[in-house]
Image (cartoon, grey):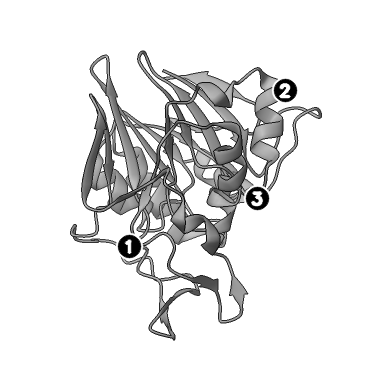
Amino acid sequence: MKITVLAENTSSSADIGCEHGLSLFVETGAHKILFDMGQTALFAENAAKLGVRLKEADIAVLSHGHYDHGGGLRRFLELNKTAPVYLSRYAFEPHYNGTEKYIGLAPDLRGSDRLCFTDGQTDIADGITLYSCNDRPRLHDCGSANLNRMENGVLLPEDFRHEQYLLIEENGRRVLFSACSHKGILNITEWFRPDVLVGGFHLMKYPCGDALRDIARQLDRYPTDFYTCHCTGAEQFAFMKQHMRRLHYCACGSSFRV
């Protein structure tokens, strides 16, 4: 399985742009999958530079309804005329950072006939499954991080019910794509116990101290290879790397095989 990073906070090359967001192009033995579309159309510009043909994607997945992952959705629908886009049925709920900054998706895209709304478990293809995990117990409480959703005109703390996870099972290995891990990287790792986990840990606001060290050490107990990025935070990654044996960073423009 080959994974190419089309959008991320940092870049591996001066020729490749970066932004706060995430977009991954995943090539399995049978499918080409776009996982998230970044904040803008940058993912498509980088794809062209990297020789990634977005028109050939036969599946697209939106991990959750935040702008830094679905801001490029309109551009993808323009470039690729056939691939279904799988996203949570809660993805178009209004999402806010604090009380005033809207961080949700463009509402007018909701009516696109390309969108396939999901909930619970969704089997996309052989060995390719989406999970919301909304019914699973969260052993580690991560809070809402000052993020909110609008329901019936009232702002409520996020429960991240719009976040979903992509599990690909191929050649006897289980590879999980988690994007931002809002429901807690420790919870998600325990739920799936994958061979490989790719995505952000949402720890960028954590001080590099005892709490972050404890998280790193707990993750290191799993026999999982972690490829992290985006909302983990560069400083936090460097700190966690001291306490984890199988932690890697995937910057924009990089490709790796798992």
Q: For marks 2 and 3, give the one nearer the viewer.
A: 2
Q: In which quarter of the image is the N terminus?
A: top left
Circle 1 sits on which residue?
Answer: 161
Q: In this view, does 135 lie to the left or right of 52?
A: left
Q: Dot 2 lies on which element?
A: helix
Measured as percent of width and height from the top left, residue 254 is found at 62, 25
The image quarter in which residue 222 lies: top left
The image quarter in which residue 86 lies: top left
* CA separation in Å, label 1 and label 3: 22 Å
Q: Is residue 78 left or right of residue 169?
A: right
Q: Which of marks 2 and 3 is nearer the N terminus?
A: 3
Measured as percent of width and height from the top left, residue 47 is found at 65, 27
The correct choice, above or below, for 14 with respect to 239 in the image is above
Q: Can residue 166 be seen in this view?
A: yes
Residue at figure coordinates x 49%, y 46% from the top left? 200
Circle 2 sits on which residue?
Answer: 49
Q: Which of marks 1 and 3 is nearer the N terminus?
A: 3
Residue at figure coordinates x 60%, y 51% from the top left? 71
Measured as percent of width and height from the top left, residue 81 is found at 51, 32
Dot 1 and dot 3 residues touching (CB under 8 Å): no
Q: Quadrant of the C terminus?
A: top left
User: In the rendered structure, which amino acid carries the disc numbered 1?
Assistant: Arg
Q: Label 3: how many residues lie within 10 Å, few (<14), some (14-19) or many (20+)? A: some
Circle 3 sits on which residue?
Answer: 20
Measured as percent of width and height from the top left, residue 88 is found at 35, 54
